[in-house]
Amino acid sequence: GIQVEQSPPDLILQEGANSTLRCNFSDSVNNLQWFHQNPWGQLINLFYIPSGTKQNGRLSATTVATERYSLLYISSSQTTDSGVYFCAVVPGSGNTGKLIFGQGTTLQVKP
Amino acid sequence: EPEVTQTPSHQVTQMGQEVILRCVPISNHLYFYWYRQILGQKVEFLVSFYNNEISEKSEIFDDQFSVERPDGSNFTLKIRSTKLEDSAMYFCASRRLRGANEQFFGPGTRLTVL
């Protein structure tokens, strides 16, 4: 099946710093989503981005489907950005829409 | 804004007991999913459900698990005889149409099996 790899696994930043999280996938995809898992365990939708670039405030994401990767940019990080960031894809060969998740990047933003 | 809801938020049960986790998907959505996340690990697909039947299930989704849409709004996951290793966060998700579109997740139910 498709493999989804995220890097780095862990990231520690000072408040105000910028960061880039990467998601590589091993096969074609129909859908790609980025999530933030908050300290209460909830999965918060950040972006639905099967291709192209989107921005939402301090966050932006770019997916280059032909090269099988996606990037999540966090600018001017805040302590509330801390948590786990997951990339998840729907394989191109599947038709049920199930999401395959990466292992996540754990971000800690220090004040 | 419509959202997926789940109850209870936390369930504690004894090994061997049956549990039912409940979800109310977004009202005009047609595809429904359950996922599981063991503490500290990634989120794993369990089962997808469309048109009142299972459309795909993972190896995790064995005979101890079942899903049901008993009425027009609820979507349930039943574990017949819980094991210690069933302790996890269970997420319900839904999406609107066939094809590539966004999936929305509920807040999760944390299941603890003692």
Image: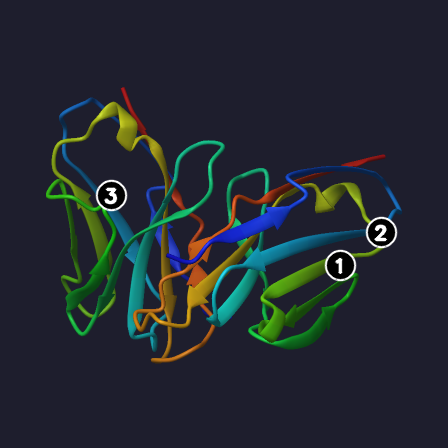
Neighbourhood count class around disc 2 (C-alpha, 10 Å): few under 14, some 14–19, many 20 upward: some
Check the residue under mark 2 and report the chain it is in.
A
Same chain for marks 2 and 3?
A: no
Q: Residue A73 got which mark?
A: 1
Q: Residue type at mark 3: give it.
A: Ile
What kind of element bears circle 1?
strand
Q: CA distance from mark 3 to mark 1?
A: 34 Å
Q: Residue type at mark 2: give it.
A: Asn
B79 or B107, nearer to the observer: B79
Q: Residue B60 got which mark?
A: 3
What kind of element bears circle 3?
loop
What kind of element bears circle 2?
loop
Q: Position of residue B76 (x, y in %)?
A: 22, 53
Q: Residue type at mark 1: give it.
A: Tyr
Q: Which residue is mark 2?
A: A18
Q: Which residue shows up at 35% across the image and 51% down it?
A: B6
Q: Position of residue B11 (x, y in %)?
A: 31, 33
The quarter of the image holding the C terminus of chain A is: top right
A60 or A20, nearer to the observer: A20
B21 relative position to B68: left or right: right
B41 or B83, nearer to the observer: B41
**Quarter holding residue A45:** bottom right
Q: Which residue shows up at 69% across the image and 61% down it?
A: A71
